[in-house]
Amino acid sequence: MLFNSIEFLLFFPIVTIIYFLLGHKDRWWWLLAASCVFYMVFKPEYLLILGFTIVIDYFAGIWIENAVGKQRKWFLIISLFANIGVLAFFKYTNFAIFALAQANIAHFKLLDFILPIGLSFHTFQAMSYTIEVYRGNQKSERHFGLYALYVMFYPQLVAGPIERPQNVLYQFYEKKSFDYQRVTSGLKLMAWGLFKKVVIADRLALFADKVYNSPMEYEGVPIIVATIFFTFQIYCDFSGYSDIALGTAEVMGFKLMKNFDRPYFSKSISEFWRRWHISLSTWFRDYLYIPLGGNRVGKTRQYFNQFFVFAVSGLWHGANWNFIIWGALHGFYLVFARITQKPRTAFNKITGLEKAPFLLKALQAFVTFCLVAFAWIFFRGNYLEQSQLFHLVTHLFSNLPNLKEFLTFNYISQNVFLNFTIVEFLTAIGLIIFMEIIHYIQRDKSIRQIVSTYPTAVRWILYYLFVMAFLILGIFDQPAQFIYFQF
Amino acid sequence: MNIKQFLFKALLLSILTLGTVEAVFHFNPYNKHDLETSYNAIIIDKYKRLQETPSPKIVLIAGSNFAYGINSKLIADSLQKPVVNMAIHYDYGTKFMFKQISPELHKGDTVIMGFEYIIESEGNKSEQLLMARYFPKAKEWMEFEDIFEEIRENSQLRIKSFKTVLERLLKNKTITFKVSDTTSVFFRGASNEYGDLVSHFNNPRMKVIPRAILSDKVSLKDAIADMNAFHQEMQKRGVKVFFVYPTYSKANYDLDKPIIDKFQKEYKKYAQFSILGKPTDFVFADSLYHDMAYHLTQKGGEIRTQKIIQLVRKTGL
């Protein structure tokens, strides 16, 4: 079920109201049943795949806890094997078959099935459970229903945040009461997430899709404009989803981990990854980078590990070379940044940038933004043919106009507005600025808290205007799927 | 605050906001103007003619390729039967179009179908609802997958209408259309008494006919199944049903030939009704097209109509 669908508009209040009307004892099964319905809207039979890994991991958790010595490791391996096996089979088999055929090594028939929605998310969440039990950070869950709910909790089932058992499981045991402040705060977060998706992301998609759907027709400025729009589109799309997920959980009294923290204000790529898709980057840090040796190994090995982890993270996103390149590119950025740390510091000193910290920070944020945006070309181009992607990358700066040419309405209309009207273009830009201002204000204090201190009449006017703005500016032609659903 | 008070507040806010949208939808100051000028409202006049024309009559059904490129008077004079051109837009889908004409067809009538290569069975619900806005009977011709689709489509229509009204109020603009002007094509008064579009006759044609969109991934199987069902029903009533391929500009045909061949194979394989001619019978030089691969000029329409008459005559009609 999509968060931006009519179905969810009916599903959410019904599930939530009944949730609050039920006693604490009965809430787990109600939430679990609701989560099953939420998932079954996509493809009912895929519930069996989830069921399979849930059963394996549930018992694996208990066995790991009860076992001693090497046995514990074996049970962990069984669990990881089952999860990675399911993930590999459904997500990477066709990719492998295709790669083998391309390399002319072997030719197999491609498997004909649709990827189970959110597979990478709930598989990773399930794996974090058995790993944490193995590490002794989490007791194994004996209540099968609650464990199933941990994996299937509908707000974060299909696109995260990828939770850790220590953060969620205990919350299912807590008695949650109806708390007006918390419920309205959650609803406001949901509304903001929906606004980011339907109003900003889907509007920016109109611009990005125009170029990325027929890439060969464009060169230079339009590619740059479309890529910048996509950079904000994917942020609004994914962070919008996370906000709705966090808000939905908050309404019912659950606190999920924050997934985004103003990533485009980052001053370095490593900072970007501390602010972007936090639940995934910390997953890779905790369960892959650190086990590979983390920062405890030699520098060369560290560089390799960092690069490797990011390439794997690219592969996690999709069985496609584009995603691997996207991840590897980020890995390269990180390694390059570490290698060039000293000369860059020296450069800042020589040029005097060090003495102008605001300028330096702005410059760093700008460079980071450009690097991230460039990498998004590979991410967005995952459906494109190789030649089309190559064209986009190689024609990013070709056919650039001189200033006189650029400053004509005809040029701007075609290449910057991408043949949309000036009002449509300015609306898109205005919405990006509006969102970033909101985020900037939220550095110190939550807007939701600020709004809740206003008198009732003012709050109602604000709510009314917000809904009207949502309806007027939103793109409602079709409920557009969230980009990260495909993973 | 308890849950009941909260729900009351939430309900009140929903009523206030959604009420605004609903109020604008129903008390839209442009309703009358749109009813008189909207292209979707052309159904009012076409349907009236369909109801009022006595049997035996010839009914033409398709998308805009029939709306543009047919001279119904020529057919009526040649075949000595009154003609009703019910074609408006391909996007309504076959199911919707057949429901539209079925109740008004009687023994001795003839139906000529000429659906585009992009025809779908279900059609576009937004377009169908838009028609229903001006012609409430059209709601009877609609089929929703489920209640959610119905709510979604109705909500979208209201939101679209809300935005349009605000925009028009801001711009304070009403648009007038005339057959005699050289720009308008799609509006209620754009057709002649038979239902043929004549509004483009004195408009300048495009020098280069743009590339049409055809996909080899699309199958016409569902639409053909609808045509078969319609044909069976009509056979029981003593109504003859024929199919002719849509017109398609030469340059586009040359590019899309493999896809059109695939569609032709599908028709041959699945169709249980009479197909008159072949796709190439209706492929003409680009100079005979107005603004796209399916839209003929007045002259093109006449040539194509003659071709249809020839083919229909061969059936003994």
Image (cartoon, coloured by chain):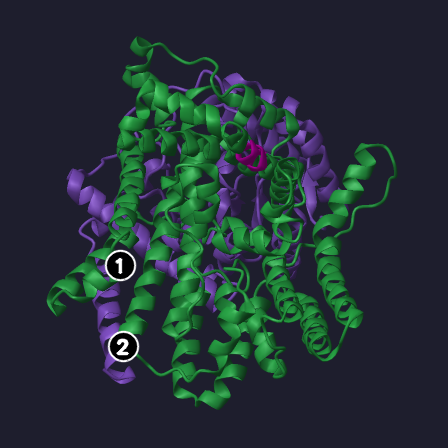
- Taking A423 as reference, is B67 left or right? right
In the rendered structure, which amino acid carries the disc numbered 2?
Tyr
Crowdedness of circle 2 by 10 Å Cα count: few (<14), some, many (20+)?
some
Q: How far across and how far down the image is residue B79, in percent?
A: 56, 38
Regarding residue A117, the answer to whether it shows in the image is no
Furthest toward the right, the residue is A106
* Residue highlighted by disc 2: A180
Q: How far across and how far down the image is residue A56, in percent?
A: 72, 72
Q: Is residue A278 above or below residue A355?
A: below
- Taking A257 as reference, is A117 left or right? right
Mark 2 falls on what kind of element? helix
Mark 1 falls on what kind of element? loop
Residue A312 sits in which quadrant?
A: top right
Q: Is residue A334 magenta?
A: yes
Mark 1 or mark 2: which comes first in sequence?
Answer: 2
Chain in purple on the image: B
Residue A131, numbered label: none
Regarding residue A228, the answer to whether it shows in the image is yes
Separation of marks 1 and 2 at Cα, in angstroms: 17 Å
Label 2 chain ID: A
Image: magenta residue range: A329-335
Name the residue at 63% across, 83% down: A142
Residue B266 sits in which quadrant?
A: top right
Q: Is residue B83 above or below residue B201?
A: below
Q: How far across and how far down the image is residue A241, in percent?
A: 44, 56
Residue A378 sits in which quadrant?
A: top right
Same chain, labels 1 and 2: yes
Chain A display color: green
